[in-house]
Image (tube, coloured by chain):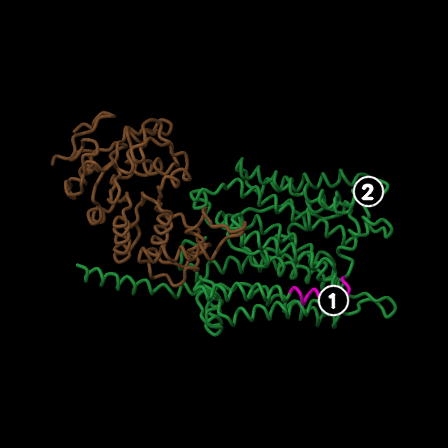
Chain colours: A green, B brown
Amino acid sequence: MAKVEDEVGQTALDEEAEPTAAAEIAAPPEILAESLGQYIRAWGRRVAGGESGALPVVLALVIIAVAFEVWTQGLFLSPQNLVNLFIESMVFMTLGMAEIFVLLLGEIDLSAGYVLAVAAGIAGLLVQKPGPDWPWWLAIVTALVCSGVTGAIWGLLVSKLHLPSFVVTLAGLLIMWGVMLVILGNAGVVSISSRILVNQHVLYQIVNGNIPPVAGWVGLAVLSLLFAGLTISRDFGRRRKGLVAPPPGLTLLKIAFFVAAGIAVVAVCNVNRGSSLVVLAGVPWVVPIVLVVLLLWIGLLQRTKFGRYVYAIGGNPDAARRAGISLATVRTWAFALAGVTAGFSGILYLSWQGGTSTNVNGGQYVLYGVAAAVIGGTSLFGGRGKIAQAVLGGLVIGAIYNGLYLQGVQVQWQLIATGLVLVGAVLVDTLSRRGTLSGSATRI
Amino acid sequence: MMSPAPGQESPTPGSAAASSVSPGTQPLLQLRGVDKHFGAVQALYHVNLDLPAAQVTALCGDNGAGKSVLTRCIAGIHQPDRGEILWNGKPVHIRGPRDAADLGIEVVYQDLALADNLDIVQNMFLGRERVHRGLLNEDSMERAAAETLRNLKVTTVRSIRQPVASLSGGQRQAVAVAKAVMWNSKLVLLDEPTAALGVVQTRMVLDLVRTLRDHGLGVMVISHNLNDVFQVADRIAVLHLGRKVAEGPATDFDLQSVVEYMTTGSSRR
């Protein structure tokens, strides 16, 4: 009898060994590979199998960059324009991050664009003198809290009353549009470009101020050491303890990539983009600020229970409910965090423009935000995506926007081009699901 | 033959309460006169059922017999309208999955309740993540998950960090069972564990069920597949239209009598 069972066990092993081809495509290559070579081969199979990860968006960025570089005869990749591009992209990136919180749940937030506009209005109005003349930090906190509360309200309507988020946040879009018009009043314009009023100037400097070039290099060095230290201690530590870890070569490659990207950004930003008389150089403050928010949100989504639950609900709400997770709480918090992040992009917008007005097109901004998330690789169907993808997606949108603007292309063509890229991104999202992966039928 | 009135046990093998359990040992879980209705539909009529430790109890019944409702009552998803649930002889109120888990009751649903986008470790710890200073303690969770899979002799997965989407049907069932038993659980309810599995994978899952019993857990298997039932069950209980019509040691039944109980609510044997 024991022998029979052994044989059965053996057969089971043989049969179970079969689906590994599918597994190799569905599983991230770094968990199956033992060496860099294996990793690259596994990655290649994955790309061929339709799970292309960040590849399409990186390729898109390269193509866009080369095309515009040729078209604008070298203007596009000039340091001055690249810095402009970074700055313009920041609003798209942060709106994309806001959307990812709710997209991961399989929901959407259409109000984010006008939440941005209202947050910009609140922060701008609170630092007016004559007027409230609040400290800059209190103005920022107030704007963020208001945005968060707004998001939480949408979240409560969606999670407690089970209303579709599309409709709730569409109503939210209209409401926040109205609120923006109300708070900006008859003048319809708020400016924070005063150089004398400290509270206005600090807000203005968030995007328009630069880190001194030397400090930029020192900051990068510290950041690189931190990143390298943390990555090595984690990956190699897990490897030593016999846990699943990426191959050592990949860890080093990751660090090298991080350092190279950092050097490129700092080097470009440190080129004098003023004149020979007025030097304008250095990394804009907004870059490290957005980086901090990015790291915070990555930590929240990848390293905390809350983040795990967001993914679980997006992947299988029933499983999450049966695991005792409070879906309503997680959903409400996700909408609140989306609101806070949209409010944060409002602060960036206010700083970037040196003020705000009733002309802010929140409807267009929110769609750019969704586009940034989806182009970056976040799924519209929930459960799949990473907050960092908003950075790449935001860069793509910013690059199109910036390049066409440089070329003097009319706004209608900017809209059409961005729309086409979005359709392309959704196509990749859908095809990657329908492609070779259809073998595992349970995938949505 | 007329179906018995609510509250009355039809004469069945071992129908005297708990007679199938060896005297002196108390069943882990006892249902006493459990009623459950949804609107006008009476799903369960005065159901009595014993689930002893270290034994596999098979719950059989045709579609609509009330197997799932019964399972959900034990799991805390539904609350019985009337009747008692006794855990180790003491009455308990199971108000939610969390209460059930606190008692040591785990359910593996037919759809397995796994999140495809999460990996094996993340699924096994879903809702009960280990946290160190507010952050997930991935190392500790991964080690514990690997050990549980080893104890259950689940050795076919390539990496414990694979997303569940990349697993085969048998592997997914194994992960779902491992997820259920890694919490010092005392009673595991398996809903159609072998449905949609091939012959070899079914053998693997049935072996897993025996491993659980040998570890001293009480197991309740809900199954349509009577071949599987007779392979693993120590005890058999049959539901018919919301009533329990038979309960006893598996040796008191044969294929024919179980089918009769399932379809007519009684048996001539």
Please tell me whether mark 1 or mark 2 is closer to you in this view. 2
Between discs 1 and 2, the one toward the N terminus: 2
User: Within the magenta stretch, is there residue A43?
Assistant: no
Q: Residue at x 31, y 55 (%)?
A: B152
Q: Chain of mark 1?
A: A
Q: Which mark is residue A269?
A: 1
Q: Residue at x 20, y 27 (%)?
A: B4
Q: Nearer the viewer, residue A105 or A336?
A: A336
Q: Amino acid at mark 2?
A: Asp
Label 2: few (<14), some or many (≥20) within 10 Å? some
* Image quadrant in which the N terminus of chain A is located: bottom left
- From this viewpoint, is residue A382 visible? no
Q: Which residues are magenta?
A: A211-223
Q: Position of residue A84 (x, y in %)?
A: 74, 62
Query: Viewed as shown, does residue A298 lie left or right of A431?
Result: right
Query: Viewed as shown, does residue A17 lie left or right of A221?
Result: left
A258 is higher (above) or lower (below) than A318: below
Quadrant hosting residue A399: bottom right
- From this viewpoint, is residue A373 visible? yes
Q: Amino acid at mark 1?
A: Cys
Q: Which residue is mark 2?
A: A133
Q: Nearer the viewer, residue A42 or A234?
A: A234
Q: Position of residue B236 (x, y in %)?
A: 21, 40
